[in-house]
Image (cartoon, helix red, strand yellow):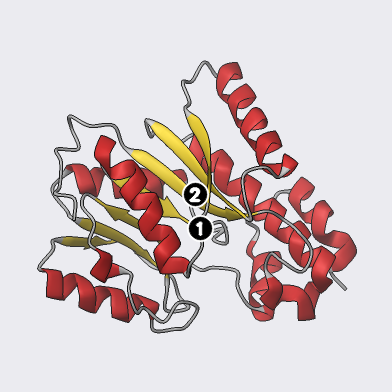
Amino acid sequence: MAERRDAREQGATLAVMAKAPIAGFAKTRLIPRLGAEGAAALHAVLLERTLRIAASSGFDAVALWCAPDRRSPFFEALRSAALRSAALSSASLELDLHDQPDGDLGARMLAAFEAHLMRGPVVLVGTDCPDLSREHLVTCRAALAGGADVVLLPARDGGYAAIGLARVDRALFDGVPWGSSEVLAATRERIRRLGWTAHELSLVRDVDEPEDVEWLLASGLLTAVERARIAPYVS
């Protein structure tokens, strides 16, 4: 277990858990609505959107945790595009690619936290929340800097879209029913048992199920370019 470090004296890392947009591998629960190619196309849109927000969030480092591994040309292209964008805006950006290890989601998230907490607090996000904003990430970082041990961005499906930690304990991830509506409740109970100081933000919405696609299309969150990329798959 890593003890909490002073976030004002350490660099903060934003970790992004990302699958390559491979048909039949990414966003499989959306296949009944979009087909395998369409689900992968939407996943690519959401992943790129998340990385743009990550690059603008002011973290000292951004780490992309890749599945099946970082050798996918898609991930290197993402990295190059993010670095070019940062250079054009005169921003400093450190963006590293890492392979997700074997194991369930909890084991993979634990590995990311353990890899980065040595340099300071870590905020971890997925790529399926179009509601995620730069302000959410800035607030998560500020909460950890203000003394919180853990910060959560709850999702309406009973999970969370982001979790930030200033220290880590395996108990936070072991035995959680990942992919269910009980993830947030189980995590809150583990935080209570650990006696940690927690901060929660307001609810956001993920895109996990076919009905979430309808919400996304009606939400106005997608740009015209993003809508055009998934239009061939939306009947």
Nearer to me, 134 or 40: 40
Dot 1 falls on a residue whose secondary structure is loop
Q: Within 10 Å of the Cα at label 1, are there few (<14), some (14-19), or many (20+) other Cα atoms?
A: many
The percent coordinates of residue 130 (x first, y second) are: 57, 58
144 horizontally vs 73: left or right:
left
Which residue is found at the position 72% from the left and 56% from the top?
A: 21
Please, what secondary structure does the residue beneath circle 2 have? strand
Q: Is residue 224 left or right of residue 155?
A: right
| Mark found first going from the N terminus, 2 or 1 | 2
Among the 4 quarters of the image, the one containing residue 26: bottom right
Q: Given the image, on which type of amino acid does mark 2 rest? A: Val
User: Residue 71 appears at what percent x and percent y?
Assistant: 67, 42
- For the residue pair 219 and 204, the one nearer the viewer reads as 204
Residue tagged 2: 16
Query: Where is residue 75 drawn, in percent x and y?
Result: 66, 42
Residue 46, compared with residue 187, is above or below; it is: above
Give the residue number, with chain letter if any, for mark 1: 126
Looking at the rendering, which quadrant does residue 97 occupy? top right
